[in-house]
Image: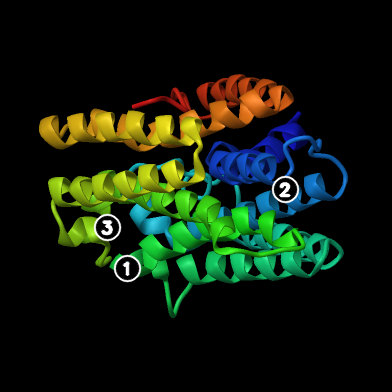
C-alpha cells in the first residue's frame, strides 16, 4: 500500500493535468497534417516523449521553486515530505533521459524538438537563466515550448515545407502566450516576496489581460488564414471571457479565462480522437480522488 501511494505521488508530481496543452496541441496538429491517420506507433511514441520531457520540467520546477510555491500555497509534494528532493531529482533525470532516448530513435525532427524542449525545461527553472523569473523569458519559454515546438514535430516531417505550414504553430504560439499572461497573475504575491522579476511583478492585471486579448485577436486571424472554423471559435470564445475578466478583474474569473482555451482545445482534440476524450475524463476523476484523499483539496477545478 505504501509503495502504491509513493508511485501515485510521483505520477501526480509530474502534474499530468498540466500536460493537456502538450497532448492537445500535438493531437490537433497531427490531425491537421494527417486527418486520416491514427495516432499509433511512432506518433504515439513521440507524444509519450513530449509528455516525459514535460514531466521532467515539472519535477525540476518544484525543486527550484520550493520557497515561492510554499508562499503561493501550491501543491507541496516536497513541502509535505511526500517526495524527497533527491528522489525528485532522480525522477527528473529518468523522465528526461527516457524522452531523449525515444526522440533519438524517432527521427531527426523529433530528436531536435525533444532536445530543445528539455533544454527549455531546464533553463526555465534552473540557474543561471531561470527564464520563469524573467518577464520576457518566461513568456517566450512557454509560447515556444508548448505553442511552437510541439506542433512543429508534425508538419516538418512532411516532404514539403511552406510558410502556410507555420500557421498551425503560429496559432498555438499566440494562444499559449495569451494563456501564460493570465497564469502569472495569481502568483504575483509569492513572486514578489521571492524577488522574482515576472511580468505580474511589473504590470497590473489589466495590462496583462489587454496584451493577452491582442494575442488572441492575432490567433483568430491566424485561424482565419487557416480557414479553420473550430480554431476561430476557440479564439472568439476566449476573447469574450478575457474581455469579461478585463472589465471585472476578479481572480476566479481570471483563472477561468486562462483555462478556457486549453479546455476547448482539449475538447477539439477529443472530437478528433474520442479515445483521448475518454482518457481525459478518467484522468480527471482519478486526479480528483487522489488530491481529495492525499491533500484534502478539490483539484483540478475551473476557478
The vertical placement of 181 against 141, above or below, is above
Mark 2 or mark 1: which comes first in sequence?
Answer: 2
For the C terminus, which image quadrant? top left
- According to the picture, the residue beneath numbered tag 3 turns out to be 191
- According to the picture, the residue beneath numbered tag 2 turns out to be 47
Q: Nearer the viewer, residue 75 or 54?
A: 54
Under tag 3, what secondary structure? helix
* Quadrant hosting residue 65: bottom left
* Quadrant hosting residue 116: bottom right
Q: Nearer the viewer, residue 4 or 147?
A: 147
* Label 2–label 3 contact, CB within 8 A: no
Residue 220 position within the rendered picture, expressed as x and y whole percent measured from the top left? 37, 42
The span from disc 2 to disc 1 (Cα, nearest Å) is: 28 Å
- According to the picture, the residue beneath numbered tag 1 turns out to be 136
Q: Nearer the viewer, residue 66 or 228?
A: 228
Residue at image location 61% in from the left, 39% down from the top: 28
Residue at image location 45% in from the left, 76% down from the top: 127
Mark 2 or mark 3: which comes first in sequence?
Answer: 2
The vertical placement of 202 against 25, above or below, is below
Residue 72 in view of the camera? no
Q: Nearer the viewer, residue 188 or 78?
A: 188
Residue at image location 53% in from the left, 55% down from the top: 169
* Label 2–label 1 contact, CB within 8 A: no
Lateral position of residue 285 relative to residue 192, left or right? right
Amino acid at each position: 500500500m505504501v509503495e502504491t501511494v509513493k508511485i501515485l505521488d510521483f505520477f501526480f508530481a509530474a502534474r499530468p493535468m498540466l500536460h493537456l496543452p502538450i497532448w492537445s496541441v500535438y493531437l490537433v496538429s497531427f490531425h491537421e497534417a494527417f486527418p486520416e491517420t491514427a495516432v499509433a506507433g511512432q506518433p504515439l511514441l513521440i507524444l509519450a516523449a513530449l509528455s516525459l520531457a514535460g514531466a521532467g520540467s515539472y519535477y525540476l520546477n518544484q525543486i527550484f521553486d520550493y520557497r515561492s510555491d510554499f508562499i503561493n500555497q501550491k501543491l507541496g509534494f516536497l513541502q509535505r515530505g511526500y517526495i524527497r528532493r533527491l528522489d525528485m531529482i532522480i525522477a527528473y533525470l529518468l523522465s528526461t533521459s527516457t524522452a531523449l532516448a525515444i526522440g533519438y530513435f524517432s527521427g531527426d525532427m523529433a530528436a531536435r524538438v525533444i532536445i530543445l524542449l528539455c533544454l527549455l525545461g531546464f533553463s526555465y527553472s534552473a540557474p543561471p537563466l531561470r527564464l520563469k523569473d524573467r518577464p520576457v523569458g518566461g513568456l517566450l519559454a512557454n509560447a515556444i515550448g508548448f505553442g511552437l515546438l510541439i506542433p512543429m514535430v508534425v508538419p516538418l516531417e512532411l516532404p514539403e515545407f511552406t510558410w502556410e505550414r507555420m500557421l498551425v504553430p503560429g496559432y498555438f504560439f499566440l494562444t499559449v502566450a495569451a494563456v501564460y499572461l493570465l497564469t502569472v497573475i495569481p502568483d504575483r504575491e509569492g513572486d514578489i516576496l521571492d524577488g522574482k522579476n515576472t511580468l505580474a511583478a511589473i504590470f497590473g492585471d489589466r495590462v496583462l489581460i489587454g496584451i493577452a486579448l491582442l494575442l488572441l485577436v492575432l490567433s483568430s486571424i491566424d485561424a482565419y488564414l487557416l480557414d479553420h472554423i473550430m480554431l476561430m471559435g476557440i479564439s472568439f470564445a476566449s476573447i469574450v471571457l478575457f474581455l469579461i475578466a478585463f472589465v471585472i478583474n476578479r481572480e476566479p474569473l481570471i483563472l477561468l479565462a486562462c483555462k478556457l482555451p486549453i479546455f476547448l482545445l482539449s475538447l477539439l482534440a477529443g472530437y478528433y480522437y474520442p479515445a483521448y476524450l475518454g482518457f481525459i475524463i478518467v484522468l480527471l476523476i482519478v486526479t480528483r480522488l487522489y488530491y481529495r484523499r492525499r491533500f484534502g483539496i478539490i483539484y483540478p477545478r475551473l476557478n
